[in-house]
Amino acid sequence: MKTRVTELLGTRYPIVQGGMQWVGTAELASAVSNAGALGILTALTQPTPEALRAEVRRCREMTDKPFGVNLTILPKIDPVPYDEYLQAALEEGVKVIETAGRSPEPYMPLIKAAGAKVIHKCTSVRHSVKAEQVGCDAVSVDGFECAGHPGEDDVPNLVLIPAAAAKLSVPIIASGGIGNGAQMAAAFALGAEGINMGTRFMATREAPIHENLKRAIVAGDERSTALVYRTLRNTARIYRNQIAEQVLAIESREGPTDFKEIQPLVAGTRGRDAAVRGGDVDGGVWTAGMVMGVIDDIPSCAELIERLVADARAAADRSTRLLG
Amino acid sequence: MKTRVTELLGTRYPIVQGGMQWVGTAELASAVSNAGALGILTALTQPTPEALRAEVRRCREMTDKPFGVNLTILPKIDPVPYDEYLQAALEEGVKVIETAGRSPEPYMPLIKAAGAKVIHKCTSVRHSVKAEQVGCDAVSVDGFECAGHPGEDDVPNLVLIPAAAAKLSVPIIASGGIGNGAQMAAAFALGAEGINMGTRFMATREAPIHENLKRAIVAGDERSTALVYRTLRNTARIYRNQIAEQVLAIESREGPTDFKEIQPLVAGTRGRDAAVRGGDVDGGVWTAGMVMGVIDDIPSCAELIERLVADARAAADRSTRLLG
């Protein structure tokens, strides 16, 4: 398969693994890359820049194919040494950096000097245009369907991708709500030249999360997510478990939301580890997207990608035939 | 073009005009039908069943092609004689009834006895399955993007259509967020065999609304809508004007929303006529969808449909080529 995205990434298929905190380790990234797509290590999954450096090396031992590093830039109480994480990845020869959260503008000189490419993740047309202006090589357009942070505009990909495509010259990677071949073909019809999948890769054999979470994704459907932190204007789509319901109850109460009340429910490693590692699906906050509505199994990354590509071709052919 | 939807409707193209209150008159419906799609008269735009009968006759004088009648069944303070509206349409020989709002089950014997087909509009997979079970001939699957009532689940078409397609045998008409050929091709890739467009048909030369509203749709983008009445669990997506902002402000206040406070802002014919007929874009509540983000002109219905079909074929071809 050949699109501007495969050429940019040096991959067989124009498919990118979503940058998922705690999930984007060498196990998953190498499996995705070995299957012909672009695996992504998430920088901040590693406690230090040096640990990221070690993870890049570990990943390289597990695959000889390209993989990328995601750097999610968010305001934090404790300052994060983003430059050092980035430097570690670039020094280790990583050639694709996915940025998210904030404009990558301050980091562009560093990345470009290392000869690496930048994909920036955006949830709006205006941010996509800005990303192109500051020199990003591709934009990952993230619709309202997505897991994690969809922004505050709530524009789904059926509208967001063609609206962005009308304004952009760089290639678009469609992100959010995509888990099967029909959706990949739809994204291409809308103007994308690649896709990004997060939740779908969580439900693969190689994803380093507890089997119970994978089963919860398979059992869940398009209504099994919740949008939390809307009152804080930091909306996040997560798996709708008991904790999500408790957060929603706090946010729906009168007056401004006090994050101090939510924090004990969601923060720290206890809840996250209970869910992601310990398998307590209700024990912590964890991210999943509406694409659960089309996820029915837990294949290997290679099986998933081959099936997806075959189904995408079949869906595009069917579409062409019916429209003919 | 030949799909199960063209065969069901007897139209050249599998394109249906959305059932739009105050907009679905003989002028628009006949123009859409003459252009090869299915025009739709909205029953309740007419004050009485007899007036609907006259409108059907008027439409028939303006086109010899098939057109349908939309019957939106909603709880009202003043009871609406739905049976009589339906009877009037069927007696006048209308062969396609689009139902929305509530399950059409009570009306199925009447419609089927007249040899007419039923398309039911649904915003969820479970309602789509129910519609098929009660004998509907097609389901119009209406995603979160749509103008009017998207339901309370907020599932966009990129996920909703394939999730519904996995469960349905009857053909799917994709509705909500569709206004150009790329989106039509995407809907087909997702499993639909037809599309429904409302807002896009409002911005046509033949739509019986004030030119100012058409210009507002062209000027608006994917962020120019608002979701109101969410607190009443009767969510509606409308054009985001001053009145929409006022309703949102009332709804965001603490405690349950008192509809009596909203009613003077939105109800009655003054506001609606000020907008739809009088051209005061801020003078009343009126409906428009996120598809404004891809609407840039005010063509005739025939120009629109021919361009849409050509662009859909081009988008499907491009998709097939890139995926090949």
Image: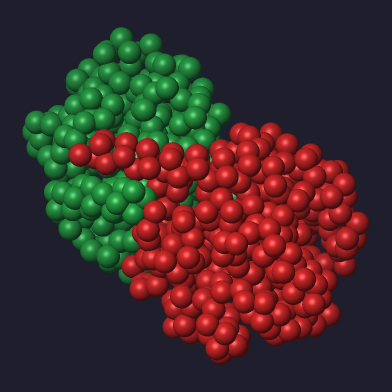
Chain colours: A red, B green
Q: Is residue A130 above or below residue B126?
A: below
**Quadrant hosting residue A164:** bottom left
Q: Say which quadrant the C terminus of chain A sits in.
A: top left
Q: Residue at x 14, y 42 (%)?
A: B35
Q: Position of residue B190 (x, y in %)?
A: 41, 40
Q: Residue at x 52, y 71 (%)?
A: A119
Q: Position of residue A289 (x, y in %)?
A: 63, 49
Q: Residue at x 54, y 78 (%)?
A: A116
**Quadrant hosting residue B276:** bottom left
Which of A316 and B246 lies nearest the eye of the viewer?
Answer: A316
Which of B213 and B257 lies nearest the eye of the viewer?
Answer: B213
Which of A288 and B100 lies nearest the eye of the viewer?
Answer: A288
Q: Is residue B307 above or below residue A53?
A: above
Q: Residue at x 33, y 16 (%)?
A: B111
Which of B317 and B103 lies nearest the eye of the viewer?
Answer: B317
Side (left or right) of B233 relative to B167: right
Q: Position of residue A25 (x, y in %)?
A: 73, 60
Q: Is residue A152 above or below residue A214?
A: below
Side (left or right) of A110 relative to A320: right
Q: Is residue B307 visible?
A: yes
